[in-house]
Amino acid sequence: MKVLVINAGSSSLKFTMYRMSGEQMLAKGMIERIGMEKPQLKYERHDGLKINELVAVGNHDDALRLVCEKLVDPNCGVLRSLADVQAIGHRVVHGGEKCHDSVRVTEAIAENIRECFALAPLHNPPNLGAIEACERVFPGVTNVAVFDTAFHSSMPAESYLFAIPYEYYTKLGIRKYGFHGTSHKYVTYATADFLGKPVYSLRLITCHLGNGCSVAAVNSGNVLDTSMGMTPLMGLVMGTRCGDIDPAVVLHLIKQGMTADEVDAMLNKKSGLLGVAGLGTSDMRDIISAVESGHTRAKQALEMFIHRLVFYIGAYHTLLGGADAVVFTGGIGENSAYIRGRIIPRLNAIGCHLDPEKNQVMGKAAIVSTVDSAVQAIVMPTNEELMIARETVRVIKGN
């Protein structure tokens, strides 16, 4: 089966084409700056051929048609015709209360995605737009929605409810949903395979660390709790997001004259590493470089990042009643030996001890803790696109 995976942003369209026998990536890429000046296509074929060019696209329909042209192009394509595409899997950020699993897109599912626009205003509209574009370009081909929130739907009520009047949950759906679920699910199962153990036998603390960051406590393949909340703003210190703060801070800022939109933009886009370090960048590599040069505020930002993460790992270790492993994934988790080297020594109290030599690994699965560690530290590269493709096949086959 050949599956096309689509991840649409407000001005971007990422795509990956898979042959699912052997789970081979045939081609991947993205179109950036859709509807803006100088849109750009990046295209990579499985044999290493790469294309990077400016393109003329005004909307997501144009972008999808251009992707299709590349996929069937006799010089750079990987398909004989678009009829080779047997299913399309879509990343959808928010499934709300109704969508607890990956599912075929129907009119009812599309309406539910639309109802969640208010919960994910930057993501769900383009996610649904890409689905509708695929329905036009690939008539009759099954579209499957794979929700970022779905893996976290196993959380018990004591984890996902907020201690506010209950009717705000029942009437407005205000609760913790969690995000990065596709990544957390992928690394949960990949870690089980790596260790040669059934997933139901493992208690894992999975740490997705990138510009956006989240942690999940996973017991037997089920999420007991996760750090992000009703939106991706809650939890860890992130690239531009503040993570956990006193809710009264928002009220105070509004009383000081800021509008709700201004506070929202500040907390989501101007906070985190960007806001504290004051370097004009949220890139962890720049933060680390500044720390090594003696930059005081960069050091403060980094310490806050580490403190919050260690706090959550310790809490989730207790919640799980102990853990088999702490798993690091995402751009920072997979590639920054420096950050892992700052975090893991803080986990000695739970029996997780750093092996500095093993920790030099980048971008591949590895155990980076000592052999006598009661809790292993594991680097596990994520692959959300492959997870979406797998989920698409699972939904179509009905298992």
Image (cartoon, rainbow, N blue to C red):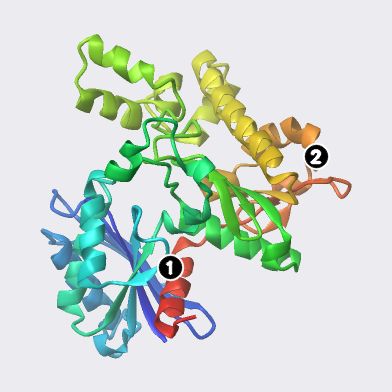
Q: Earlier in the sequence, mark 1 or mark 2?
A: 2
In the picture shown, does residue 274 fall above or below 6?
above
Density class for disc 1 (Cα within 10 Å; few <14, some 14-19, many ≥20) is: many
Q: Residue 50, can we see it?
A: no
Using residue 32 as the reference point, say whether residue 161 is left or right of it: right
Mark 2 lies on a secondary structure that is loop
Mark linked to residue 388: 1
Q: Nearer the viewer, mark 1 or mark 2?
A: 1
Position of residue 326 measured from the top left corner of the image (x, y, whole percent): 68, 47
- Disc 2: which residue: 353
Question: Is residue 24 placed above or below 236 in the rendered structure?
Answer: below
Q: Position of residue 250 (x, y in %)?
A: 32, 20
Disc 1 element: helix
Nearer-the-camera pick, 118 or 289: 118
Residue at the limit of the structure toward the top, as seen here? 256
Outermost residue toward the left?
58
